[in-house]
Structures are given as structure tokens and as C-alpha cells.
Amino acid sequence: MSTSTEASVAANVQAAIAAYAQALDTGRMDDLAEMFWPDGVAEIAGIGTFEGQEAIRKGYAAFAPAQPQLHLTANTVVTSWTEDEATAVSNLAFFQRGEAGWAVLLVGRYDDTLTRRDGVWRFQRRVTTFLQ
């Protein structure tokens, strides 16, 4: 018997998206890689595609924060869902604190596919694109 509802799926998707931003902004790349399935994919437009947790860990090491930073994710919409898979789209803004204070360095979009295995939701695929 299924206990998943659209609201519970959306809550799990939102929790994964928020945990990703927190891990990235605090430089916890091991935790970030664990948010993907072992066969997960992270694609960052203009930078590269990382397939598998180890490639994701190594690829994201280049983004370890050298100064305070924040990824703000907003307007997340779950575009499709089943008990074990959901797709979502979110807007993002990346802020970094420098000598003059906080500044927006870029804005973009996440297109996500998350899957649930053994009751756990993780990213199967995350595509990051930047807006000009």
C-alpha cells in the first residue's frame, strides 16, 4: 500500500534541494556526492558532466568555497511525480561575500530528477544552467 502523496513527494524533493545547497555552500563535497545515487549524474552547463558519486565529488571540489557563499534556490515546482520518481525545476541565485559585501554572481536554473530507493530520495540527475 502506498503512503506517498504529492505533498510528501514535494517535501522530499524540497529537502534534497535544500540539503544540496547547504552542503555546497559549506564545502561538504562528500555529503554532496552522497545526495546522488551511485549512478547519478550532475551536469553543469559550460563546465562538465560528472557521472557517479566519485566523479561528482571530484568535479565539485573545484567549487569548494574560498569565501562565504550562498546558493538560494526558489520557485521549485515539481513537474511530475510517482511514488519513486519526481522531476522538478528551480531557480537559483548564487551570492558571494567579498570586501564590499554580498553580491549576486550568477543566476540560473536546476532541472532535477530524483528517485526513491528503499525509502530514500536522492538525485538521479541534476542539470544546472546559467542565465545570461
Image: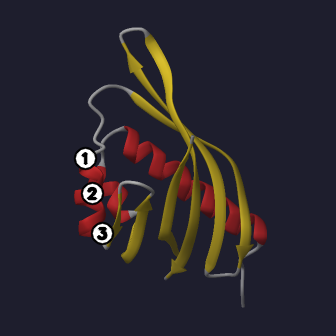
Q: Are marks 1 and 3 in contact (CB under 8 Å)?
A: no
Quadrant, the C terminus: top right
- Residue 35 located left or right of residue 54: right
Q: Are marks 2 and 3 in contact (CB under 8 Å)?
A: no
Numbered badge on residue 59: 2
Mark 2 or mark 3: whose residue is earlier in sequence? 3
Q: Position of residue 97 (x, y in %)?
A: 41, 20
Q: Are marks 2 and 1 in contact (CB under 8 Å)?
A: yes
Mark 1 or mark 3: whose residue is earlier in sequence? 3
Q: Nearer the viewer, mark 2 or mark 3?
A: 2
Q: Position of residue 72 (x, y in %)?
A: 56, 38
Disc 2 element: helix
- Disc 1 designates what residue? 62
Q: What residue is at 27 percent from the left and 57 percent from the top?
A: 59
Disc 3 element: helix
- Disc 3 designates what residue? 53
- Would you place residue 131 above or below residue 57 in this image? above
Label 2 amino acid? Gly
Label 3 amino acid? Gln
Q: What residue is at 33 percent from the left and 56 percent from the top?
A: 31
- Residue 104 located left or right of residue 1: left
Numbered badge on residue 89: none
